[in-house]
Image (tube, coloured by chain):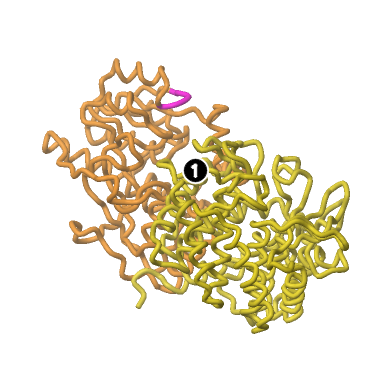
């Protein structure tokens, strides 16, 4: 009934080999099959190039693209987590290779490159991309104890602190020159993750400045100004969730800053209500929560499901897990398990639904599969927790 | 007392039971406002709500002959109740004919047809038995208000699947009689009618029992009004409770698992209620 929410890691591992061929039984595949298929797709995205990065996406017209250091960074903890739950050392070994590959890309001043990876081409650094790579470097250090990964992370975090403006914004090395978006909460959070191990006060102070600046952009209606790719344009649910998650996770690492979690909770609750009342999320929302409804940003669904589950962790309010289950279920409908054209699509998640939607049009990005896998694993954990703690149980 | 009953669809057992039993109790049931099932707006709203499940629900309702043998537990309890009360009507139309009430089919309870009929009739109470969200103009018409039997303890559990959410929080499910206002289950409270959860009950049984209890709650609340001339109500504050939404099958599965192994035995009642009363 609950897709293995109550199974132990051992039985999950045992069932992996027997259940997985059942993926062919579309549409009867369970969420366990879907999770395995998403991880397999991510492995194929890694194997498609000779380096140890994961390809940015599979394009319907062009096939696999180049490796993408940014999202390779945050796929690393997903792989470690999956490897631990399903006892797959081969997946953990892949994650470690990814982390070492990222460290190998570091530039002399500690910066990490933006854009995709093409051998022989030196890319300009990027604030956001570097921070996502920090997530992978820190996860690699935590998993392997390899000090060189922590050194690389600390150098990158110090570089991020060094190029920050006095008001807590970053305007250099940005996706859109001169624009410091609110989803840079997801720059500050990885900086704080690094500080947990490096104890670098300069980095911590920069992250706090950045988060204070963004938390002040909370509007009375629960929206946060500038949380899209461009100012005054509707924000994809992808970047909305980036913003909320960054604030939430940073508040957990720095509990004295309750206004970060308050801002995150207000935004998360607002979009939760919109989702529950309308039964779906729009692909993007403007500052007045007017949705662009003709497509869904699927990765945004998964990311918001994750935010809601983190909200449950903080408040114990089961409504958020309930909404997360529904948001994930919508995404599951769009995961091809028996694709008729490209077998490479099997297990991937498209950027938009329909696939010609405005977010990553006709592409299957690696971060959609990553956040889908994260959401499924988190959901099973939370359901297991709820099941083991009936009301009034001692 | 002039009563109007609403109905969500033409075979609503809940509405049929209310129309007949209210008339038998001596109330003047003047109208039944039945929301037409076949309205594009309604189909679209339901499809948005239920998704692909909508089609199987339609099939079930269209071909549900009313025989008890294969009924889902949610429907079985109210069907058995109709049988026990010797109510032979199987449609709202038949029930109205039996008691001499007018049946008014409307696209929405809030549309002009409905409003003008109600303004002309001036009911004392509208008894809500389904049909969608009510708007201010209709709510303002009846002298004593619109009576609802909410499926869970208020103000704690507002909104959808209230019995399930009550169980999820270790609260005794039951029906809470209250008056409808502009908010979602935020109107003044009349009384809570708890139901007993038997050892072998599952979620579907509790939902089924709650439908029967809702009919009985309406009768009790109207009797209170009849005897006292007015309802003694307790206001709610919006901050006193949370709004819940339809429960995902994965959580329903957990609830059923708890019920099956007896982990929901010490359900809490609201402070002012002493004993649960089975329907």
Which residue in the protein does label 1 denote?
A: A274
Q: Which residues are magenta?
A: B105-109
Q: Is residue B1 left or right of residue B126?
A: left
- Percent across and percent down for residue A68 are 76, 60
Residue at the image position 40 percent from the left and 17 percent from the top = B112
Chain letter for the orange part: B
Choose top left, top right, bottom left or bottom right for residue A16.
bottom right
Work out whether A20 lies above or below A332.
below
Q: What is the quadrant of the N terminus of chain B in the image?
A: top left
- Percent across and percent down for residue B163 are 38, 54
Q: Nearer the viewer, residue A306 or B71?
A: A306
Q: Is residue B127 left or right of residue A129?
A: left
Residue at the image position 25 percent from the left and 61 percent from the top = B269
Chain letter for the yellow part: A
Instruction: Look at the image and say whether residue A358 sits in the magenta stretch.
Output: no
Work out whether A324 lies above or below B264.
above
Dot 1 lies on which element? Answer: helix
Instruction: Look at the image and say whether residue B108 sits in the magenta stretch.
Output: yes
- Percent across and percent down for residue A298 are 66, 50
Q: Is residue B56 visible?
A: no
């Amino acid at each position: 009934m609950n897709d293995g929410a109550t199974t132990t890691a051992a039985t999950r591992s045992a069932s992996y080999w027997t259940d997985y061929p059942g993926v062919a039984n579309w549409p009867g595949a369970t969420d366990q099959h879907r999770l395995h298929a998403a991880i397999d797709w991510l492995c194929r995205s890694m194997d498609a190039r000779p380096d140890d990065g994961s390809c940015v996406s599979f394009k319907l017209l062009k096939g696999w693209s180049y490796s993408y250091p940014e999202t390779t960074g945050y796929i690393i903890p997903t792989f470690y987590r999956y490897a631990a739950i399903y006892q797959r050392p081969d997946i953990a070994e892949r994650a470690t290779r990814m982390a070492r590959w990222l460290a190998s890309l570091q530039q002399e001043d500690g910066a990490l490159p933006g854009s995709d990876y093409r051998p022989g081409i030196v890319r300009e650094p990027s604030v956001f991309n570097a921070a996502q790579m920090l997530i992978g470097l820190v996860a690699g250090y935590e998993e392997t104890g390899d000090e060189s990964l922590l050194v690389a992370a600390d150098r990158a975090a110090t570089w991020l602190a060094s190029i920050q403006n006095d008001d807590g914004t970053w305007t250099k090395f940005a996706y859109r020159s001169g624009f410091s978006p609110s989803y840079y909460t997801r720059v500050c959070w990885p900086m704080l993750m690094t500080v947990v191990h490096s104890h670098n006060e300069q980095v911590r102070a920069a992250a706090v400045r950045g988060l204070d600046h963004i938390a002040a952009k909370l509007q009375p209606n629960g929206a946060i100004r500038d949380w899209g790719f461009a100012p005054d344009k509707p924000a994809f649910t992808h970047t909305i969730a980036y913003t909320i998650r960054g604030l939430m996770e940073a508040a957990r690492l720095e509990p004295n800053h309750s206004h970060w979690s308050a801002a995150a909770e207000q935004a998360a609750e607002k979009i939760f209500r919109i989702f529950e009342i309308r039964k779906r999320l729009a692909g993007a929302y403007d500052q007045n929560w007017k949705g662009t409804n003709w497509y869904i940003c699927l990765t945004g669904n998964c990311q918001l499901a994750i935010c809601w589950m983190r909200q449950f962790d903080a408040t114990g309010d089961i409504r958020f897990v309930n909404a997360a289950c529904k948001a994930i279920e919508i995404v599951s409908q769009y995961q091809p398990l028996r694709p008729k054209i490209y077998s490479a699509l099997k297990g991937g998640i498209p950027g938009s639904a329909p696939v010609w939607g405005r977010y990553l049009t006709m592409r299957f990005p690696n971060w959609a599969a990553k956040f889908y896998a994260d959401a499924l694993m988190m959901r099973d954990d939370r359901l297991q927790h709820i099941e083991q703690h009936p009301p009034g149980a001692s | 007392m002039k009563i109007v009953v609403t109905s969500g669809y033409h075979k609503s057992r809940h509405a049929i039971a209310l129309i007949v039993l209210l008339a038998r109790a001596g109330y003047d049931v003047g109208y039944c406002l039945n929301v037409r099932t076949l309205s594009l707006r309604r189909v679209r709203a339901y499809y948005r709500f239920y998704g692909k499940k909508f089609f199987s629900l339609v099939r079930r309702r269209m071909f549900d002959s009313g025989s008890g043998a294969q009924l889902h537990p949610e429907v079985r309890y109210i069907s058995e109740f109709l049988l026990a009360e010797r109510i032979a009507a199987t449609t709202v139309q038949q029930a109205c004919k039996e008691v001499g009430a007018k049946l008014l089919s409307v696209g929405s309870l809030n549309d002009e047809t409905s409003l003008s009929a109600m303004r002309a009739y001036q009911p004392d109470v509208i008894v809500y038995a389904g049909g969608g969200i009510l708007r201010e103009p209709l709510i303002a018409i009846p002298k004593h208000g619109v009576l609802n039997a909410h499926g869970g303890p208020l103000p704690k559990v507002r909104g959808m699947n209230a019995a399930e959410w009550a169980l999820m929080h270790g609260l005794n499910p039951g029906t809470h009689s209250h008056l409808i206002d502009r908010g979602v289950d935020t109107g003044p409270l009349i009384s809570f009618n708890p139901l007993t959860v038997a050892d072998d009950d599952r979620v579907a049984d509790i939902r089924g029992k709650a439908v029967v209890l809702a009919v009985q709650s309406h009768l009790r609340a109207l009797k209170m009004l009849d005897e006292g001339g007015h309802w003694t109500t307790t206001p709610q504050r919006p901050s006193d409770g949370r709004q819940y939404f339809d429960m995902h099958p994965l959580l329903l599965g957990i609830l059923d698992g708890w019920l099956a192994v007896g982990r929901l035995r010490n359900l809490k009642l609201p402070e002012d209620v002493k004993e649960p009363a089975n329907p």
